[in-house]
Image (cartoon, helix red, strand yellow):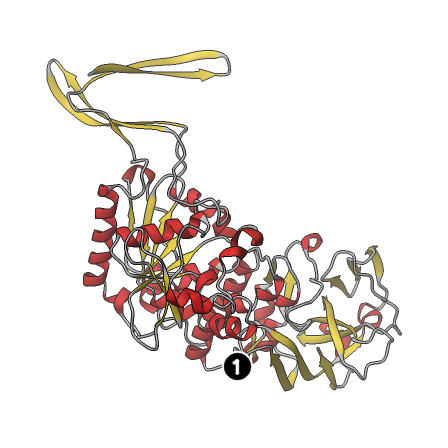
Amino acid sequence: MKGYLDISVHRGSILEEFFRIEFQTQQPLREHPSRNPLSYQNVKKIKLWLKECGKKHKICNSNKTSFSPTRLIAVGSSGDPLRIVLSEGRPLKYVALSYCWGKPEIVAPSMTKSTNLTDRLAGFPEAGLPRTLQDAIHVIRRLDIRYIWIDALCIIQDNINDWEKEAKTMGSIYENAYFTIAATAAKGSSEGFLTRPSCCKLEIPFTVTEQDKVVQGGTFYLGYPWHSPTDTLISTSKWRRRGWVFQEQILSTRILYFTNDILYFECLSTQKVEDDVYGLPPALVTPWFRDAKIQKRRLRSGPTGVDAYPYWYSVVEEYAEREFSFPEDKLPAISGLAQKMARTIDDRYLAGLWKGDLHRGLLWRPRIKMHMTRPPQPGAPSWSWAALDGEIEWDRVSFLRACSIEILNAEITPFGPDPMGRVTGGQLVLSGKFLPVGKVLRHPRRVRAGDYTDSDHGEAHCDLYDLDFDISSEGSIQALMVVDGEGLLLEPADHSGEQNEGHRRIGYFECDLSVFDQVEPRVITII
């Protein structure tokens, strides 16, 4: 076949350069890549990637446990009914699905509930499941794997006790799966991820000759519409914004991404892509470890030492950007990472913070204040970042300042069996220096009502954009110094001005350290 490519370079409407590249090839044109994610060639590649990882990657196979989820779905062969099986402690080889639920009413009819559990132990049809779930089952059948874990099917969704028990093991479920299917191409459970959009992508080999002598060769890749890089396909997906996906992605030993255009495989040791044209994205490196090689070696055991706390704050800053259908899931959806952290630093977890570094942990602040909201039923105490919805951050300068509080007592009340999951309340009893905020700022001037107040001696910020507070010198809003020159704004919990029922966090402040020189520490309770 003969052909040519015309390339023109314009500056505005003026043509500056024109090139014509002629080519001739005896090789047939091929579609690039295959429109079928599970083509014979792709299935062969996936099996090879998994086989090489299982045999050659010590890191990926280190600390492998015999853990299996309580329930799995036995998929059988094509056309066979599905069946819920109880693992009963057997180390079964299974795949986990990470996906977007989408509209609850789409998933609801297919959920496992108390009323259909017995029937599903005997067998149930695949046909009634949402497309994404069916596609995942099709994938593991093609790969000759017998079991899959899907939350909607393997957790009894109308039994809160079962949900809490299984949510506690979510980190272990993804960490111990043979691999995780990341359905990044699907915005919801009804869409599926095995149908690629219609497009034209061709690969054309060519050679360059001079005086009948070949001097150079290569390949033209033609596509319409033009493809996005692998990293973009994943990072811009709705899947990537989902809150639960955060720890599912980090803790998975191996992940097979089904994007709109291509397959991408990632484990703790290597990366593979269906077609090299798309390129490899940056390796998944959690904020716990700045160096990729170190991260890969230590991900199984987690961070260690004093520096572990700033890494945790980096994790939370990224996590807080994610979206949740149910705000009360915010703590359960990161409990797997918290469990790993707790095992390595030997510290007590308090609704998203750590007792051993509480003075720094308390100083989180909204990143974009006007986007912060307080859910109708907060899933955490007011002093926890999980009490509000929106992006948060820590000012690393605060980490250098000396602690100004003493922790007398710190308690949380778990909702269920997971002390790192949902909570119904919590309180901190602290000894520290505090004053009415008006006395701290001395001569405050309101810059924007309910948002920000400053003076020559410091500044105070509300966590919520539309929250108003009393800045008078005798007002009920207290400024508690947590580290030298920085602390929390607290209001009486009962809103009557009485302080017997404790205080709630409403913001933070910075001030001259000298303001508290003559102040004696007192005891205060924050809920």
Let me know if residue 401 appears in the view. no
Tag 1: amino acid? Arg
Decide which of 20, 385 is in the foreground and name it: 385
Mark yes or no: residue 501 visible.
yes
Q: Is residue 15 above or below residue 469?
A: above
Residue farthest to the top, as pictured:
14
- Identify the residue shown where x is 39% and y is 69%: 71
Q: Quadrant of residue 291?
A: bottom left
Image quarter of the N terminus: top left
Give the SS element for disc 1: loop
Point out residue 298 in the picture as x, y percentages from the top left corner. Answer: 34, 69
Q: Nearer the viewer, residue 365 or 24?
A: 24
Question: Which corner quadrant of the image does residue 24 belong to?
Answer: top left
The residue carrying mark 1 is 348
Can you say whether 274 is above or below 205 in the image?
A: below
User: Residue 518: where, in percent of width, then height?
Assistant: 78, 82
Rendered position, 369 above or below 163 = above
